[in-house]
Amino acid sequence: MTPPDLSPFDPARLEAIAERWDTPCYVYHEGLLRNTFQAFSSALEGRPHRLCYAVKANSSLAILSLFARMGAGFDIVSGGELQRVLAAGGDAGSVVFSGVGKRADEIRLALQAGILCFNVESEAELLRIDRIANEMGLRAPVSLRVNPDVDAGTHPYISTGLKTSKFGIAYDDALRLYQRAASLSGVRVVGIDCHIGSQITEITPFIDALDRILLLVDMLTSVGIMLHHIDLGGGLGIRYHDESPPAIGDYVHAIRSRLDGRPQHVLLEPGRALVGNAGLLLTRVEYLKAGEERNFAIVDAAMNDLMRPALYDAWHEIVPVRPRTAGRINWEVVGPVCETGDFIGHERALALQEGDLLAILSAGAYGMSMSSNYNSRPRAAEVLLRDNGENWLMRERERITMLYANEHIPD
Ligand code: LLP
């Protein structure tokens, strides 16, 4: 499998963006964003469904608004993400709220907004939601996030469906908890949910999880608990390097075929598969530093802009926007942050000169949304390559004064 390349992106537009808005800068491709969303929705056509985009993958308002206009629902994990969805014009009634640590104020906010469903991760949370809903004179729609105990075969930090994981309700406990939920006056049982991990590159773990969930659905039916929807979470992987994840259509069809004849709506919570390969991080080579054992290309993007290499040892393809014909040698591509872990890529064969513009590919998911201000670096600008040819500034580069605007020096 060949790695992703720059072909969907027009180098002249990238150069113009770097010129106008400087680097580092995230750039997204509207057409690609639309295509991936469309691939999910057309594969689900004819089956009652809702695509709840996992906001954490990229929570920038322009992205949320684009998906909202295409009919997306949203999967959120905080009150902050809910506020972003609403600010972007998303519909609260199509929001599912996941996460192991929902605070009381977040639960209240979600109840007030009228979300579609809470994906409940523990008995304690169930009881808290029940109590708050009762206080507000409401009934909270809930799903239990069940841990199907399957191995997603992905990085341990992003594998969530094993018994040892902090996520979800133990499979063997689920029936009892559903019965408990059904007896509470402040909640209404509407669905079942699971999410087994992220960057999963095979279909089998998804189907294993689904089969385990369907067994539970049947058990629940036999005790008179009828569900309105089955939520299979997110997790479909993308190609960063040489992975060969299933095509979106194949993944959806495999799930669909298992659900034939069942009345429930199907919910999916894709994040990475929708945005990952639709975004890149533009960066400029600041310095070339030939070392004794290694050559360093110091670029102006760093681990605070794109944390994935430092955190997961993740691979992102790095390509020059205007490739040079000769002079390729191996480079350690690193950022300016004061940590040895601040690297973008190791041993990349590239022909480089100072000032060259590079594109760090597959950076649309968990790039900007995981960025920080470490080393007092302002967060990057974001630009959308619109289908109409316009380069749209989605987010201005942070100004340094914004970084300390809410700090107080003692007198
Ligand atoms: N639903 C739930 C409950 C989740 O926890 C996640 C991701 C998703 C959906 C979306 O998963 P996706 O379709 O994007 O795989 N920062 C890591 C990924 C963390 C994923 C956390 N949960 C990375 O950069 O690889």
Image: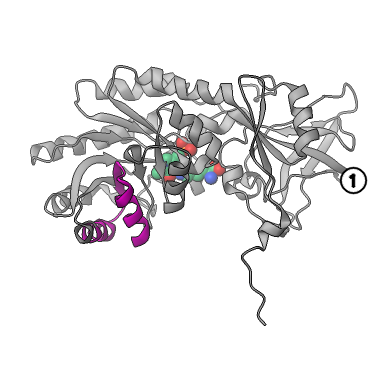
Label 1: how many residues lie within 10 Å, few (<14), some (14-19) or many (20+)? Answer: few
Seen at 33% across and 44% down, the residue is 149
Task: Give SS at disc 1.
Answer: strand
Q: Nearer the viewer, residue 275 or 241?
A: 275
Question: Residue under circle 1?
Answer: 289
- In the image shown, does 214 or 14 lie closer to the viewer? 14
Instruction: Give the x, y percent position of residue 244.
Output: 54, 25
Q: On screen, 361 above or below 159? A: above
Asked whether mark 1 lies closer than 8 Å to ligand 1, one says no
Range covered by the magenta-colored residues: 104-132
Q: Name the kind of residue labelled 1 in the image.
A: Lys
Percent x, y of residue 326: 90, 23
Q: Is 107 in the magenta?
A: yes
- Residue drawn at (69%, 19%) of the image: 7
Name the residue: 67% across, 76% down. Answer: 409
View extreme (bottom): residue? 411
Of residues 98 and 331, which is closer to you in this image? Answer: 98
In this rendering, is residue 395 above or below 252?
A: below
x then y, percent, for residue 395: 63, 41
- Residue 298 seen by the camera: yes
Name the spot of residue 296 as percent of width and height, x first.
84, 44
- The residue depicted at 56 percent of the width and 33 percent of the height is 276
